[in-house]
């Protein structure tokens, strides 16, 4: 169809293909351009999300390392009254998962508020998909687990005598 329109325009303007002074834009062309822009935006936003997850993971890991350092005596007492390495590991991993899930939930709440404001101001319809929300909370917990593994192992490996002394 666009080729026929272009032929008609060439005849109406009395020009050749080389010297045409017009362009024909089809809905397919517009759709392709829109898909290209959307793809670039997706990559950009995905990169921002990846950096945010990395920073969040480093923050959780740092928090857990500080927690282990500050609670050495507590760990020593717990181990001296019979706690196993697995109990200490579970305690610190639970804490890091909780930090991740709470952080992810707060991030989702901020996204909901910001999305509602953008929707009201700009008139853009924003939808929140329950599966994506649950996936984000699960992923936040997973970041917490990954970030807390090393500090939790460090806490579980502490010698009770050294922990009580220090």
Image (spheres, rainbow, N blue to C red):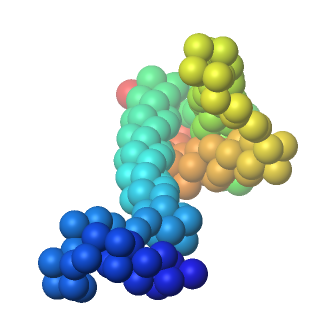
Q: Quadrant of the N terminus?
A: bottom right
* Left or right: 148 as drawn, with respect to 105: left
Q: Residue at x 35, y 72 (%)?
A: 12
Q: Is residue 94 visible?
A: no
The quarter of the picture where residue 62 lies is top left
For residue 146, above or below residue 22: above
Q: Residue at x 22, y 78 (%)?
A: 15
Measured as percent of width and height from the top left, residue 143 is found at 57, 49
Measured as percent of width and height from the top left, residue 83 is found at 73, 42
Q: Quadrant of the C terminus?
A: top left
For residue 2, above or below residue 22: below
Q: Residue at x 21, y 84 (%)?
A: 16
Q: Residue furthest left?
A: 19
Q: Residue at x 43, y 52 (%)?
A: 41
**Camera-nearest residue between 99 and 6:** 6
* Left or right: 22 as drawn, with respect to 126: left
Q: How many marks?
A: 0
Q: Residue furthest right?
A: 130
Measured as percent of width and height from the top left, residue 145 is found at 61, 50
Measured as percent of width and height from the top left, residue 147 is found at 50, 48
**Camera-nearest residue between 36 and 149:** 36
Q: Is residue 59 visible?
A: yes
**Camera-nearest residue between 91 and 139:** 139
**Camera-nearest residue between 14 and 105:** 14
The quarter of the picture where residue 93 lies is top right
């Amino acid at each position: 169809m666009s080729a026929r329109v272009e032929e008609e325009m060439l005849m109406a303007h009395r020009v050749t293909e080389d010297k045409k002074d017009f362009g024909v834009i089809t809905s397919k062309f517009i759709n392709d351009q829109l898909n290209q822009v959307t793809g670039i935006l997706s990559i950009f936003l995905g990169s921002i999300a990846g950096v945010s997850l990395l920073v969040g993971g480093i923050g959780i890991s740092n928090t857990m390392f500080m927690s282990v350092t500050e609670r050495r005596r507590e760990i020593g007492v717990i181990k001296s009254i019979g706690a196993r390495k697995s109990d200490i590991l579970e305690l610190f991993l639970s804490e890091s998962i909780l930090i991740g899930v709470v952080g992810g939930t707060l991030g989702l709440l901020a996204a909901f508020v910001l999305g509602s404001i953008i929707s009201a101001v700009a008139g853009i319809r924003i939808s929140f998909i329950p599966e994506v929300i649950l996936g984000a909370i699960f992923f936040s917990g997973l970041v917490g687990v990954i970030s807390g593994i090393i500090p939790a192992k460090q806490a579980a490996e502490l010698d009770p005598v050294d922990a009580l002394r220090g």
